[in-house]
Image (cartoon, rainbow, N blue to C red):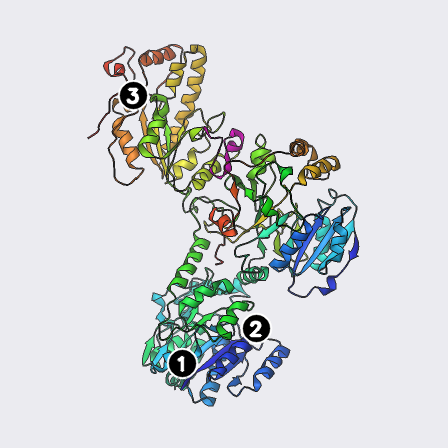
Amino acid sequence: MTVGIIMLVHTDFERAEQVARHWTKSGCPVVIHVDRKSPTAEYDRFSMALNADPLVRFSKRHRCEWGKWSIVQATISACEVMLAEFPQADHVFLASGSCIPLRPVEELVQYLHDRPDTDFIESATTADVPWIVGGLSDERFTMFFPFSWKRQRYLFDKSVELQRKIGIRRRIPQGLVPHMGSQWWCLTRRTLDEILSDPNRRRHVAYFREVWIPDESYFQSLARIHSRKVESRSLTLSKFDFQGKPHVFYDDHLQLLRRSDCFVARKIWPRATRLYQTFLGSGGVAAGRSEPNPGKIDRIFARAVDRRLRGRAGLQMQSRFPRQGFEHGITAKPYSMFQGFTEIFEDFEDWLTRTTGARVHGHLFAPDRAHFADGQTVINGALSDSATLRDYDACQFLTSLIWNTRGERQCFQYGPADTQDINFMMVRDPNAQISIISGAWAVPLFRSGSSFAQLRQTAARLQKIEAQQLEIMRASWANARVRIWSMAEFIESPMEPLQTITDEFGQSGQRHLSEAPRLRDLSGFGQFLQHLKNEGMHPYLMGDFPVEQSDHMQVPPVRKPYLVR
Amino acid sequence: MKPVVDRTSAIEPGAILLFACVRNEAVRLPYFLSHYRKLGVDHFLIVDNGSDDGTVEQLRAAPDVSLWQTTASYKKARFGIDWLTWLMLRHGHDHWCLTVDADELLIYPHHDTRPLPALTDWLDRSGVPSFGAMMLDLYPKGRLGDAHYEPGQNPVEVMPWFDRGNYTIRLQPRHGNLWIQGGVRARVFFDTSPRRAPTLNKIPLVRWNRRYCYVTSTHYVLPYALNTVYATDGGEATSGILLHTKFLDTIVEKSKEEKSRREHFENSDLYETYYDRLIANPTLWCAQSSRFVSWRQLEGMGLMSRGGWT
């Protein structure tokens, strides 16, 4: 009345010996298979050390290769020894040299004793499993695999390609439905006996010899034929990384493993002294009759796979440098760019800060320096306001700023006088909210009172830059939320766009704007534009402003609260 | 280059080796050696370039150090790399080799609970032959020369501050490596010429083969494939940090010496003003500096990553 342990060992014999003794101390017979590739001297030392133990046997050695039949052959040989020599083994548990029992062995024995007819073997049809490595699911059952995946990858891939092309399909033996699952199972003596004495065994073996990774499918498929009760899960906790290789547990996983209530875990790092001491020394962590509960471990390791494969959005660093299109998020968080707003409103930045609570910067990309909020010269992450440093890589300046200030929405002013390098990046970025009042750059010129000869050149330059920028912003492939108004259009009814923009900040509870920013006094602006025209320049981005002051141009800035219903 | 003490016959297969080139590092060495011993370095192979401050005596006395000595030009030996390449060719083949300067302390994910062999085993299993670690310049809060440091002390205690989010990265197609600049030195000393700011990317840990070689310091390795220590598919590869303790209080005196020796960097003239400013005993700290706590903090800030190694 106990469980027999099959141990597949190929390295770290001292640890394997320690684990084997732990099993036999609790009365569990152990049959060990040692890979024939392991050095003879080490094998001799290992087998000598365990020979005196009446509950240990060594099975015929096979040369094992990952993904090949030899591993199943090794398992079968060991199972035959187990069934023949240890009649007391009611269940047979397949483990490796780097597995350790986490709970007292008696609890496992009791658990299996309570479920005398249950076979614990993860076993699912190929259509239903997500864990395929190398892209082969059905095909591993219908092709030939003469080459080693580990040593002859090129030939392996070519042979798969060729077989696909000429349409080779092996026939699956009648009555057999291919199932897959974890290599680490625990079967009842009866099921195992029936699998090994199956009248069709030769036929099955001949078939599985050519299947790829048969250690994940031979017993899994045959158990479906012979088992009375399949419980499709493994009693061995084993996590896989993104390459499909098993994760290794270290000393710092101690608490996680303790609380998992799993019976056995693999793989344990051979030098994880504390794990070996804790789980073998004191006989494991008692958990009574509770079920294994690997939920937390599952979540943590799933997160690791996710970090390896998807990474953190908006992060560029020494080990994450996505090529274009693979960023999974160009920037970390949503942000807003405003163009032309400080030009036509007197107090736009203060107003926006008051209304939204966001961090509102001035012209971050101005030629003299980065105008950070509150006049700071260095901002989060020690990002400097130096224009030279910023322009060394303006895009990374912006992604760094957004990354450094995660958790606080950033807004900044922009315009045609600023460094233009970030336009392409912003327009590709779904996090960017871009609002442009075109032609508003003319307002500061209008208010400067400088000579027209000078202004004319500046105006022409700014208009050209903005026209080019607008072309980018109107790209059909834009992912950003882009809004563009001509200045004339915008001042017709400024509150509606402001409401829409601030609504998108997504603060809790949508609010109506109760206060408007003050429009600058624009009387004479139409005349100013006409002057520019008379100088031979053609301002058009601001839309049409009549030369004679029309009514709405005279409307002084809205001073009383402006309510949008 | 002449051997002073050669204990390399004690190197066992699978040992992790550390290679370094030093000059007058008696102050840093006690902590340096203990830091790397604790991580699990098995043997140190060190070239001394004309020290006269007790460095040689200290290293000679250490049981796990093999020491060579030369008084030839550091610059002509491509900043010591030629000397180290020769040693690595002789002794590094098929070992995990760590190549660092005396002012660089490597940390990596889980370094406080998992020794270096855990990392290298895992890199081996994943088929990854090289490991990247960016230099992170540390500095004290006040003037550089005023933070007093005792030999043997953890330098991070006197200079725990760093810049966390002002780095620029570009891909260098020629060697396939990333070129990282920025941090405090760019912010303070190179704000008018960021292109000249020091290179911060390094690949200090490599499963060495006698056919490999470092190109400039440990910034780039040949063959190129070893430089791909980053993921381009949006994921994060595992990476570490070299805590750079250049700005110890000794930096002010050392800068005077270095300025006259003109043995550093490709173009010594460019660095004249840099040294002048260091000699003036500046403050690098700013209100947005971050204080070092742990590798988890650096990972949270996005300066390093555990990648899939959890």
In the picture, which quadrant includes the N terminus of chain A? Answer: bottom left
Is residue A299 inside the magenta stretch?
no
Depth check, mark 3 against mark 1: the one in front is 1
Q: Chain of mark 2?
A: A
> Magenta segment, which residues?
A375-391
Of A48 and A460, nearer the camera is A48
Q: Chain of mark 1?
A: A
- Which of pointers 1 and 2 lies earlier in the amino acid sequence? 2
| Circle 1 residue | A109
From the top left corner, tell me how far across and down residue A531 is, in percent: 37, 10
Badge 2 density bin: few <14, some 14–19, many ≥20, Cα 10 Å: some
| Circle 3 residue | A488
| Circle 2 residue | A11
Q: Amino acid at mark 3?
A: Ala
Q: Relative to B259, is A279 above or below?
A: below
Tag 3 and tag 1, C-beta contact below 8 Å: no
Spatial CA span between label 2 and label 3: 78 Å
Spatial CA span between label 3 and label 1: 83 Å
Label 3 element class? helix
Q: Relative to A151, is A186 above or below?
A: below
From the top left corner, tell me how far across and down residue A181 is, in percent: 39, 70
Of B283 and A195, nearer the camera is B283
From the top left corner, tell me how far across and down residue B66 is, in percent: 74, 57
- Which of pointers 2 and 3 lies earlier in the amino acid sequence? 2
